[in-house]
Image: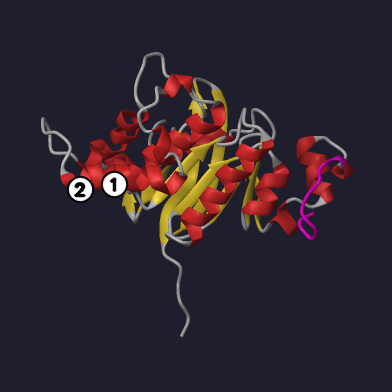
Amino acid sequence: MTIVATPILTATKLAVAYGARRIIGDAELVITAGERVALVGPNGAGKSTLLRAMTGVLAATGGSVSLCGSPLAGLDRRTVARTIAVVPELTQLPFAMPVEEVVALGRLPHDPPFTGLRLSDHEAIDAALERVGIASLRARDVRELSAGERQLVFIAVAIAQDAPILVLDEPTAHLDIRHQVEVMQLLVALNERDGTTILAVLHDLALAAHFFPRIVVLDGGRIVADGPPSTTLDPARIRAVFGVDPALVRLPTGAG
């Protein structure tokens, strides 16, 4: 019997523009439940813009996005937040806040208005802290943490949100190599063990090729390749899209 993969997030002829300047043009992208997909491309290729449009943060100027078969534009924000958890590019909070309270923000889509955290919320927060290995930091001020620790906090927020889709924008930016690998290993575990669908913008081709079985390459606001690293990150494409000698990009054996 053939098992048909279920589309969970789909862009159809998606276009995004700022005024007269086109950022994304006629993008076609289908993410199925349980996939782990990386968006890569040079600076200005439109990776983050595509991500924001596919999560409803930016309004499309053409085409459409569907979430679990329903038009994204017609869904209320709480419904979207229960389905898609977004980890933005690493930022610093401007005010003091304990780690546990930051992670509790992930429960907002599940809370009835004007009520406090329930037992199920506290259990989800505890589980998220344990899942990313930062339970010992729960009382620390997030501003005092290292960049790697803060990134794990924001991933814990998304885990506490308990959404089937996890979307990340440059989750390894500004991290040292150890924390980069820890974050990537965590994403693989969330995908393979928990079944979470992962869609991430990455700038490091080697990390993308090593940890993601599907790579989507953007260039000039268009998707120019979509498939396994061995075909999407071949030497000719690396040279054409990124403008560098492929020999300078260390990819896993068989990826390029």
199 up-or-down from 94: above or below: below
* Quadrant assignment, res 255: bottom right
The answer to whether 111 appears left or right of 32 in the picture is left
Look at 53% across and 21% down and name the residue there.
20
Q: How many numbered marks does the figure carry?
A: 2
Look at 24% across and 42% down and name the residue there.
122
Q: Residues within 10 Å of mark 1 (few under 14, many from 20)?
A: many
The image quadrant where one finds the C terminus is: bottom right
Q: Can residue 255 be found in the magenta stretch?
A: yes
139 up-or-down from 79: above or below: above
Residue 120: numbered disc: 2
Q: Can residue 17 be found in the magenta stretch?
A: no
Residue 80: numbered disc: none
Residue that carries the numbered disc 1 in the rendered image: 124
The one nearer the camera, 161 or 140, is 140
> Residues in magenta?
248-256
What is the x, y in percent for residue 87? 45, 36
What is the x, y in percent for residue 141? 40, 22
Answer whether labels 2 and 1 touch (C-beta < 8 Å).
Answer: yes
Q: Rounded to the nearest whole Å, what is the CA distance between mark 2 and mark 1?
A: 6 Å
What is the x, y in percent for residue 185? 57, 50
What is the x, y in percent for residue 221? 61, 35
Q: Residues within 10 Å of mark 2 (few under 14, many from 20)?
A: few
The amino acid sitting under disc 2 is Ser
The amino acid sitting under disc 1 is Ala
Main SS, magenta residues: loop
The one nearer the camera, 225 or 88, is 88
SS for callout 2: helix
Residue 1 visible from this viewpoint: yes
SS for callout 1: helix
Q: Residue furthest bottom?
A: 1
